[in-house]
Amino acid sequence: MSKLIAAALIAAALSPAGAAELTIAIDGVSSAEGQILVALYDSADSFRGKPLRAQSAPATAGAMQLRIKDLPPGDYAFAVYHDANGNGKLDRNLLGMPSEDYAFSNNAAGKRGPPEFEQARFALPPGGATNAVNLR
């Protein structure tokens, strides 16, 4: 019995305190080819640079969800795109415009380029949250 209690205490100590789960509901996935990639940011300084977390999942045509677990509550923003050809990058046309579907949290859109962190920022409470986006 004492081994069971010790194991439970160790597991509790190793799990992040106040960890929240972010569910990203993605609509408008054009096909089941390739991957859906998400980059999660926790500051304006890192936004569209080095993400705090990155995650991918096989694409599912129509709608799908991705979950990012064990996040401290706070402010975040994310970018998501459908890497339909599986080359690991967001493809662009000759003018530099994305040629693969993408979205930012809050469905934020910039006027001449990507949105700023403040436009895509959302609060993740201790109980977790769902953020829905539509690929375009």
Image: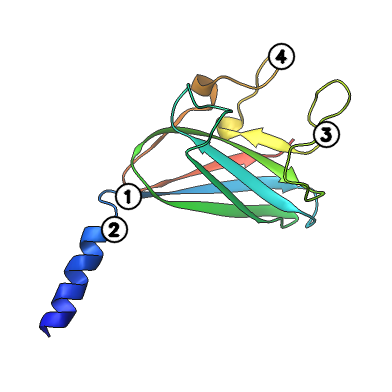
Q: What residue lies at 75% left-to-right and 55% top-to-bottom? A: 61
Secondary structure beneath disc 1? Answer: loop
Quadrant where the N terminus sits is bottom left
For mark 2, what is the residue? 15
- Three-letter amino acid code of the residue under disc 1: Ala
Q: Residues within 10 Å of mark 4 (few under 14, many from 20)?
A: few
Badge 2 density bin: few <14, some 14–19, many ≥20, Cα 10 Å: few
First-in-chain label (2 vs 4): 2
Q: Determine whether label 4 and label 3 are within 8 Å by CB.
A: no
Residue 10: image location, x then y, percent? 21, 66
Image colouring:
rainbow
User: What is the three-letter code of the residue carrying label 3?
Assistant: Ser
Which residue lies at the image location 72% right of the left edge and 58% below the top edge? 60
Instruction: Identify the residue at image location x=22%, y=63%.
Output: 12
Q: Which residue is mark 3?
A: 99
- Which residue is pictured at 10% across the width and 81% down the height? 2
Q: Residues within 10 Å of mark 1 (few under 14, many from 20)?
A: some
User: How far, Cα to Cα, is label 2 from label 3?
Assistant: 40 Å
Whether label 1 touches label 2, CB < 8 Å: yes
Which of the 4 image quadrants contains residue 104? Answer: top right
| Proximity of marks 2 and 3: CB atoms separated by less than 8 Å | no
In the image, 64 versus 73, the foreground residue is 73
Which of the two discs, 1 and 4, labels the residue nearer the N terminus?
1
| Residue 51, image x, y percentages | 52, 36
- The local secondary structure at tag 3 comes to loop
Amino acid type at mark 2: Ser
Relative to 88, is 72 on the left or the right?
A: left
According to the image, label 4 marks what residue?
Answer: 112
The residue to which callout 1 is attached is: 19
| Quadrant hosting residue 59 | bottom right
Report the front residue among 4 and 106: 4
The three-letter amino acid code for the residue at tag 4 is Arg
